[in-house]
Image (cartoon, grey):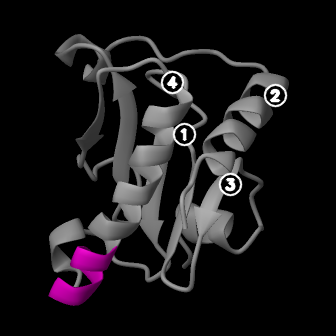
Amino acid sequence: MSTLFTKIINGVIPCYKIAENEKFFAFLDINPLQKGHVLVVPKQETDYLFDLSDDLLADLIIFSKKIAAAIQLSFDCNRVGMSVIGLEVPHAHIHLIPINSEKDMNFSRPKLKLETTEFEEISQLISSNIKT
């Protein structure tokens, strides 16, 4: 059975896509901790991040680095934090979150409620700042 993220990758479930290539897909988290919170996933369905092959894991980090750079250009933040929790959806994924302090990555905090137009604007902003 396809994971939620595979359904998003395949267009069955809509998303606010940031970028994709033949191996990876990046999209906005619809329950973000901060504006610009992005999820990066391999297209290959693998539950646990560290079960990915070494090459795929390395390529995922390199793909994520480009997305993180675009997030940093898009938002006033000190850093882009990266988190791997892996319990919410059984599909390996990385959270990229613009942060100014460690508190900005506290997943127990209430999530932001954004309007569709805000998600669209954020998606377009980050996408436009990706350097190829």
Question: Can you identify the residue that label 4 sits on?
Answer: 75
Q: CA distance from mark 3 to mark 2?
A: 13 Å
Q: CA distance from mark 4 to mark 1?
A: 16 Å
Q: CA distance from mark 3 to mark 4?
A: 17 Å
* Quadrant in which the C terminus is drawn: bottom right
Dominant SS of magenta comes to: helix
Who comes first in sequence, dot 3 or dot 4? 3
Question: Can you identify the residue that label 2 sits on?
Answer: 116
- Point 68% across, 48% down: residue: 128
Q: Is residue 12 above or below residue 109?
A: below
- Residue 17 image label: 3
Q: CA distance from mark 4 to mark 2?
A: 18 Å
Amino acid under label 4? Phe
Who comes first in sequence, dot 4 or dot 1? 1
Which quadrant of the structure image shows residue 52? Answer: bottom left
Who comes first in sequence, dot 4 or dot 2? 4
- Point 18% across, 17% down: residue: 102
Question: Can you identify the residue that label 1 sits on?
Answer: 29
Considering the numbered disc 3 on the image, is that residue within a helix, a strand or a loop? Answer: strand
* In contact (CB < 8 Å): disc 4 and disc 1: no
Q: Residue 61's x, y, as percent?
A: 28, 65
Q: Is residue 26 magenta?
A: no
